Image: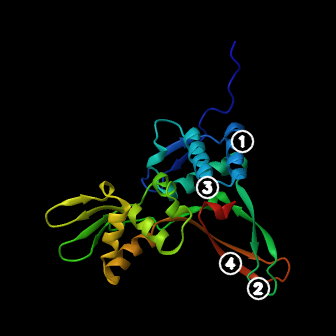
C-alpha cells in the first residue's frame, strides 16, 4: 500500500498582475523549502532564480507556464506563496536614516499587503521619428535573469541589456523587424543610433515598468527618529 500524500491540494487563489489571470496554489512544502535554502546558501543568482521559479511552478495548480511570467509577476507570486507557507509577516533589518545613529532596526513587513505598483494601461509603441517606431513589452523573468548583463552588470551595460529585453520589434513604413532575430551587438548599434530624446523615450518605458513595492514606516528604537523607506523587489522583503 502506498503512503498517503499530505498538503497537495491548492488552498488559495491569486491574480497574476501582468495578465489578470486567476490561479490556484498551495503553500510550498519542506521539499521545496529545502531546495530554496540550498540555493540561498550557494549565493549563486542563477541557482536562486531557478529555485524560485521551480517553487512557483510546483505550487501552482494546472497547466501554467511559469516561463511566461514577467519579473514582477514572479516576485509577487513568490512573496504571496511564501507568506502562506511560513508566515504572513517577514522581519527584516533596516538602518535608521539618522547618520549619527545608523542603528539596525528589526521591522515586521505584512506580506499580505504587498502589491505591484505601476500597473495600468501603457503605450507599448514608442515613436522615434516619422518613419521608425519601436514595439516594447515587459520581458519575462526567465529572459531577464538568464542574462548576466542584467543580473551582474551595472551602468550603461545593464541599461542596454534591459532595453534589449524590452524591445520586441522595430517598425518601419515597409516592415516589422523582429528584434529577437538579431544579435545583441546589432540591437545595441540601433540603440546607439538614437538621439538623446529618442533614447530617453525608450528608457522611460524601462523605468516605468511595474514593480513589487511597499512603503514602510518605523520609529528607530535607538534614537526615536521617524523613518520611512520604500521596499522594492523581492530581495528587500526577506
- Residue 145 at x, y percent in the picture: 52, 56
- The residues tagged by marks 4 and 1 sit, at their Cα atoms, a distance apart of 34 Å
- Where disc 4 sits, the SS reads strand
Q: Which tag, 3 or 4, sits closer to the chain's start?
A: 3
- Please, which residue is most extreme toward the top here? 1
Q: CA distance from mark 2 to mark 1?
A: 38 Å
Foreground mark, 2 or 4, reads 2
* Residue located beneath label 1 in the image: 34
Q: Residues within 10 Å of mark 4 (few under 14, many from 20)?
A: few
Residue at 49% of width from left, 35% of height from top?
62
Separation of residues labelled 2 and 3 (CA atoms): 32 Å
Residue furthest left as drawn: 174
Q: How is the image coloured?
A: rainbow
State the CA–CA distance, disc 2 to disc 4: 12 Å
Q: Are marks 4 and 1 in contact (CB under 8 Å)?
A: no
The disc, 4 or 1, on the residue closer to the chain's N-terminal end is 1
Q: Quadrant of the C terminus?
A: bottom right
Tell me the residue at 31%/58% (across/down).
182
Q: Which residue lies most toward the bottom here? A: 100
Nearest-to-viewer mark from 3 and 4: 3
Tell me the SS state at disc 2: loop
Amino acid at each position: 500500500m502506498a503512503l498517503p500524500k499530505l498538503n497537495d491540494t491548492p488552498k488559495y487563489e491569486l491574480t497574476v498582475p501582468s495578465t489578470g489571470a486567476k490561479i490556484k496554489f498551495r503553500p510550498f512544502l519542506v521539499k521545496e523549502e529545502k531546495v530554496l535554502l540550498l540555493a540561498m546558501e550557494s549565493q549563486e543568482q542563477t541557482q536562486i532564480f531557478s529555485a524560485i521559479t521551480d517553487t512557483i511552478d510546483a505550487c501552482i495548480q494546472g497547466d501554467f507556464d511559469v516561463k511566461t511570467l514577467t519579473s514582477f509577476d514572479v516576485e509577487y507570486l513568490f512573496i504571496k506563496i511564501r507568506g502562506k507557507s511560513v508566515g504572513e509577516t517577514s522581519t527584516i533589518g533596516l538602518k535608521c536614516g539618522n547618520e549619527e545613529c545608523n542603528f539596525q532596526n528589526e521591522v515586521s513587513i505584512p506580506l499580505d499587503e504587498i502589491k505591484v505598483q505601476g500597473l495600468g494601461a501603457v503605450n507599448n509603441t514608442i515613436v522615434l521619428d516619422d518613419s521608425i517606431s519601436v514595439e516594447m513589452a515587459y520581458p519575462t523573468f526567465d529572459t531577464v535573469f538568464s542574462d548576466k548583463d542584467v543580473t551582474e552588470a551595472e551602468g550603461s551595460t545593464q541599461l542596454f541589456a534591459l532595453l534589449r529585453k524590452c524591445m520586441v520589434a522595430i517598425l518601419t513604413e515597409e516592415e516589422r523587424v523582429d528584434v529577437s532575430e538579431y544579435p545583441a551587438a546589432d540591437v545595441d548599434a540601433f540603440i546607439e543610433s538614437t538621439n538623446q530624446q529618442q533614447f530617453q523615450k525608450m528608457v522611460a518605458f524601462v523605468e516605468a515598468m511595474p514593480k513589487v513595492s511597499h512603503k514602510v514606516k518605523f520609529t528607530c528604537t535607538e534614537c526615536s527618529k521617524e523613518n520611512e523607506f520604500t521596499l522594492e523587489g523581492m530581495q528587500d522583503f526577506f
